[in-house]
Image: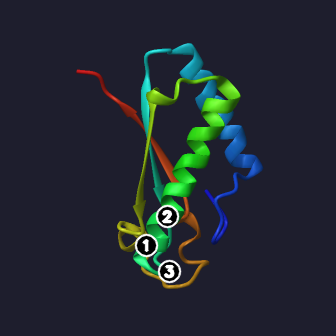
Amino acid sequence: YFNANSDKLSKESIQALIEVGKYLKFDSEQEILIQGHSAPFETEKLQYQMGLNRANIVKNFLVENFNIESNRIKSESLGASQAGTIVSGKTNEDYKKYRMVQLKKIMKE
């Protein structure tokens, strides 16, 4: 999770990403997709960019701190495209749980 208008990792997020990094080091074949999200404020372009910034900061943390090959980690932005399905409010406080990234395993065929 992120603060409003921020792509900086919190201490709590870093702790969670350390566990992800350990897992990716252990399973050297696993690939993941990082999806960045933002609240529906500003323009769609800015929402998309914030989501992408958040996804990339997580990817960079894993690559730099755990030497994970960058081709094992895909990143994308969903902007605020799914925000309406999360909460019905319209303030920064209403959307605080939506300022996040989601990590998903990429299943091999």
Residue at the spot x=63%, y=23% of the render? 67
Answer above or below: position of 33 versus 35.
above
Disc 1 and disc 3: Cα gap in Å?
Answer: 10 Å
Residue 34 x %, y %: 46, 44
At horizontal 61% and vertical 39% (from top left) the residue drawn is 60
Name the quadrant containing residue 6.
bottom right
If the image is split into quadrants, where does the N terminus sit?
bottom right
Distance in Å between CA atoms under marks 3 and 2: 12 Å
Q: Residues within 10 Å of mark 3 (few under 14, many from 20)?
A: some
Query: Residue 41's mark?
Result: 3
Q: Are marks 2 and 1 in contact (CB under 8 Å)?
A: yes
Vertically, is 54 above or below 98? above
| Residue in the foreground of this view, choosing between 36 and 11 | 36
- Indicate the quadrant containing the C terminus: top left, top right, bottom left or bottom right: top left
- Amino acid type assigned to the residue bearing label 3 in the image: Phe
Residue drawn at (35%, 68%), measured in percent from left and top?
A: 81
Q: Earlier in the sequence, mark 3 or mark 2?
A: 3
Query: What amino acid does circle 2 point to?
Result: Gln
Say what amino acid the circle numbered 1 marks: Lys
The residue tagged with tag 1: helix, strand or loop? helix
At label 1, counting other C-alpha atoms closer than 10 Å, the crowd grade (few under 14, some 14-19, many 20 or more) is few
**Secondary-structure class at tag 2:** helix
Q: Is residue 36 left or right of residue 25?
A: left
Q: Quadrant of residue 65?
A: top right
Q: Position of residue 100 (x, y in %)?
A: 54, 57
Along the viewing direction, whichever of 66 and 1 lies nearer the viewer: 66
Q: Which mark is residue 49?
A: 2
Label 1: which residue? 45
Q: Position of residue 23 (x, y in %)?
A: 57, 22
